[in-house]
Image (cartoon, rainbow, N blue to C red):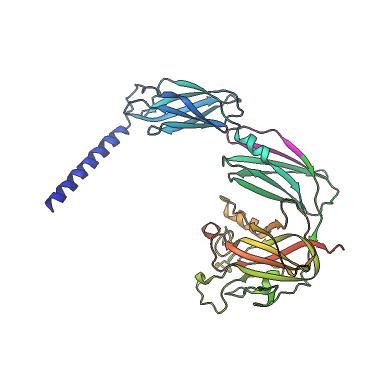
């Protein structure tokens, strides 16, 4: 036992000694005016999209804290980056083009003294703004248009969208950090013959801006499918071998999903899945769950708008903030089907993921959720479905745990758009 204690004591003393030496390294000495040695830059560097990774050997000075890099952009502004003394490289970003760029490196000690500078010339790859801009696709759709783009580098860029029609002009700016993004812009009550002029440019945080891309698009007219003729099969009634799901769990009721009343956190207007005869345990959830609608007559469907629930326990107070939107017991991924009368089978249309918008003010989540999430049945080439009398919505996953939750879920409203059978 005494031997073990001795060994532990020695280890402890060594750790303490090392900690003291490390803390001494970071003690600030304001009287120090001696600059540190300069970093040694490797001749080899790695070109990056819109930047470069520069390799270096830091000076031996014990009080060096960082190795910094700077360059001057096309606007005459100094762009600065910093890397820890413990690393051997620094990433420099924000170049506007692929022309050679001069980057200056220097060391900084704990008293703020800077070393002599070293300069390297690098040739970056295509900048992020150009890559994102070249991927943007603008397409007209049903009472709306949408933009697709790729941002595989996940660098922070802003997408400036200006659109005008009938003498009106509006501007929207989206901040992008995801690899793939799609944004819908709704434009109700616009004629199919009215051109909408769309201008798009991309800007990064370093002030670089892409060329302006301009296009003219047209809307496709559809209408809300009236719900007064809809018939909702009761639970376990099967259509084409698929049973209607159970949506009457807890406070939820199936009839609320098509009543045109949106849950606002106070009226508790939603349907809720859950095993019939459930025990009240949330873990009893039963996704996937189907919600089948008899449209009452044949329609060619174009799009769907769904509304989430916001279970607020603060009633009678007015709900504020995010509430349960985009999380908790709300559906994040669902699939859509229409009935093919010729094949006497369900035709799988698509699976839609409701994108969670990160880092928004709480109230903005409420505004977005209560406006509803819209999805086309056919996204890449917007068009109407074949005529059908039956529509099936299949709830697959909730938002929680990165869209893997299959606990019981709530759904406030389903609204469908399209046109009556044309022939």
Q: Residue furthest bottom?
A: 277
Q: Which quadrant: the C terminus? A: bottom right
The answer to whether residue 229 is above or below residue 28 is below
Magenta span includes 44: no
Q: Residue 99, position in %: x, y? A: 60, 24
Q: Can residue 267 be seen in this view?
A: no
> Is 26 on the left or on the right of 142, as rendered?
left
> Is 12 on the left or on the right of 286, as rendered?
left
Q: Residue furthest right?
A: 423
Q: Can residue 121 be seen in this view?
A: yes
> Is 194 on the left or on the right of 199, as rendered?
right
Residue drawn at point x = 59 percent, y = 54 percent: 356
- Say which quarter of the image contains residue 334: bottom right
The answer to whether residue 37 is above or below residue 279 is above
Please state which of residues 7 and 387 is positioned toward the viewer in this rendering: 387
- Say which quarter of the image contains residue 319: bottom right
Please state which of residues 46 and 120 is positioned toward the viewer in this rendering: 46
Residue drawn at point x = 55 percent, y = 65 percent: 406
Residue drawn at point x = 60 percent, y = 71 percent: 272
Q: Residue 155, position in %: x, y? A: 56, 39
Residue drawn at point x = 52 percent, y = 72 percent: 284
Q: Residue 335, position in %: x, y? A: 65, 62
Q: Residue 353, position in %: x, y? A: 62, 56
Q: Which quadrant: the N terminus? A: bottom left
User: Which segment did they paint magenta?
Assistant: 197-214
The answer to whether residue 270 is above or below residue 135 is below
């Amino acid at each position: 036992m005494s031997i073990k204690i001795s060994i532990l004591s020695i280890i402890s003393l060594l750790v303490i000694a090392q900690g003291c030496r490390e803390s001494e390294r970071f003690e600030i000495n304001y009287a120090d005016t001696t600059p540190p040695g300069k970093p040694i830059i490797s001749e080899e560097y790695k070109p990056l999209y819109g930047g470069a990774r520069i390799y270096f050997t830091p000076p031996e000075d014990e009080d060096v804290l960082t190795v910094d890099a700077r360059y001057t952009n096309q606007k005459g502004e100094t762009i600065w980056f910093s890397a820890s003394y413990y690393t051997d490289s620094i990433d420099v970003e924000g170049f506007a083009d692929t022309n050679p760029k001069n980057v200056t490196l220097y060391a900084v000690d704990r008293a703020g003294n800077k070393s002599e500078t070293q300069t390297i010339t690098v040739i970056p790859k295509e900048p992020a703004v150009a890559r994102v801009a070249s991927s943007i696709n603008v397409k007209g759709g049903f009472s709306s248009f949408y933009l697709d783009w790729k941002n595989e580098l996940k660098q922070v860029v802003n997408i400036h969208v200006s659109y005008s029609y009938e003498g009106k002009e509006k501007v929207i700016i989206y901040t992008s950090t995801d690899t793939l993004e799609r944004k819908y812009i709704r434009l109700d009550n616009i004629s199919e013959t009215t051109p909408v002029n769309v201008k798009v440019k991309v800007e990064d945080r370093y002030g670089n801006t892409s060329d302006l891309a301009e296009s003219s698009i047209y809307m496709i007219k559809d209408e809300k499918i009236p719900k007064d003729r809809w018939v909702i099969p009761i639970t376990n009634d099967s259509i084409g071998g698929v049973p209607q799901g159970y949506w009457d769990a807890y406070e939820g009721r199936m009839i609320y999903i098509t009543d045109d009343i949106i849950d606002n956190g106070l009226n508790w207007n939603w349907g809720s899945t859950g095993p019939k005869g459930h025990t009240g345990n949330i873990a009893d959830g039963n996704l996937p769950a189907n919600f089948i609608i008899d449209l009452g007559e044949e329609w060619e469907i174009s799009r769907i708008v769904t509304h989430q629930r916001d279970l607020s326990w603060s009633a009678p107070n007015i709900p504020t903030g995010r509430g349960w939107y985009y999380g908790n017991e709300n559906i994040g991924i669902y699939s859509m089907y229409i009935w093919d009368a010729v094949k006497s089978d369900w035709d799988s249309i698509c699976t839609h993921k409701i994108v969670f918008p990160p880092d928004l003010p709480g109230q903005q989540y409420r505004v977005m959720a209560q406006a509803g999430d819209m999805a086309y049945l056919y996204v890449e080439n917007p068009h109407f479905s074949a005529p059908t009398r039956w529509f099936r919505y299949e709830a697959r996953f909730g938002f929680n745990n990165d869209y893997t939750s299959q606990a019981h879920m709530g759904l406030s409203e389903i609204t469908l758009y399209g046109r009556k059978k044309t022939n």
